[in-house]
Image (cartoon, grey):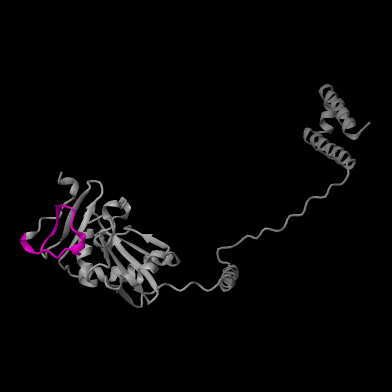
Amino acid sequence: MPPLRAFCFFLVIACSASAGTNAWAQRISSSELLLRYLQARTEFLAERDAQYPFIPLSYRSPQTVYLPGDTVRVWLENLQHQRLLASLPEPLPLFTVESWKKISPLHAPAFQEDFDLTQWAFTGSNSRSPVDTLRTADLRSRFQTLFGSPTVTLVESSDPDSLQREQIVEFEYWFMLNDSVRVVVLDVNGPWDRGVVLAADQEYRSHLPIIKREFLEQLIPDADRTPFADYYYNFDQQTWYLTGFDGASFFDRRIERPDMSTGRPAAIRGSESVPLDDPNEND
C-alpha cells in the first residue's frame, strides 16, 4: 500500500479511536497528526514526481537592473553615442547667400532657355514673416525699390488672353544667387493676395526656406515703397486691370485690353489713381 494511502487509513483509524477513548487523544494531538499528514503527502509527491523523466529549465540571461546613481552606465551610453556620431557621414553644409544679381528685362532673353529648362521647386506663403503676410502689391512696391522693374510681366507674354489661370502672373523677378543658383520670385494671385512664391532648382529644394529667409526676409522689412504700375488680367472676370502704387496709396482700375505693343505702363502718381480693392467687391 502506498505511504499516502496507508497514512490516510491510519488517520481515519486514529480519528475513530480518538472519538471512542480519551487515552488515544492524550497521546496524539491534532497538530501532530497534521504534521504527519504533511510529511506523508510530501513523500508521496516526491515518489510520484520521481517516475517522470527529468526536464531541465530553459536558460534565461541575467537582467540588468540600473540604479539612479549608476555613473558607469551614463559613461557607457555617452561612449556609445559618440561612436555612433563618429560613424555618421559629415552633415551637408547649409546654404548661404553670398551674392545675388537680378536679371534685368534687357538681359532676360539671354537667360530664357536656362530658366525655361529648370526643374523648379516652390515654396509659398506659410510663415508669419513680412514676406508672407504683406499684401502682394505692397511687396511689389518694395521690390521696385530694391530690385527695380520686374524681369518679366504680362506685357512680355505672347498672348495673355490664352493663358490658363495658373499661368497668369503679374510679375516675375529672376535672380542668380552665388553666380549659379537660379531663383524666381513671382506673385501668388495678383495684387489682391498676400505674399509671393519663391522658386529654385529642385537641387535646392531643402534649402528654399533658408534662401527665402537669408535673401528676401533680410531685405523686405527695411525697404521703402516706390511707385509702379502693372497690367493684370483677372481670369474669372475676363477683365484687365491697371494696378500699382502712386506714392501715397495702392490702386487698381478696370481697363480695356491694353495694347501690349506699346510696352509696360508708366507709373501713375497722385490723383490719377483709385484705391486698391478686391475686384470681386467691385461688381
Tell me the quadrant of the picture where the N terminus can be found. top right
Left or right, residue 212 beside residue 227? right
Residue 175 lies, in percent from the top left, at 32, 71
Q: Nearer the viewer, residue 6 or 44?
A: 44
Task: Indicate the position of residue 68 as horizontal and vertical percent values.
Answer: 55, 63
Closer to the camera in the image, 253 or 208: 253
State whether residue 22 is above or below residue 133.
above
Residue at horizontal 72 percent and vertical 57 percent from the top: 61
Residue 31 sits in quarter? top right
Q: Residue at x 18, y 63 (%)?
A: 262
Q: Which corner quadrant of the image does residue 80 belong to?
A: bottom right
Point out the residue furthest to the left here: 271
Q: Quadrant of residue 147?
A: bottom left
Q: Nearer the viewer, residue 246 or 162?
A: 162
Q: Residue furthest front?
A: 261
Image quadrant for the C terminus? top left
Q: Residue at x 87, y 38 (%)?
A: 48
Residue furthest top as drawn: 20
Q: Which residues are magenta?
A: 248-271
Number of marks present in the image shown: 0
Asked if the magenta segment contains residue 127, the reply would be: no
Is residue 230 depicted above or below 235 in this figure?
Answer: below
Asked if residue 34 lies left or right of residue 195, the reply is right
- Left or right: residue 42 compared with residue 220: right
Let me know if residue 175 appears in the view: no
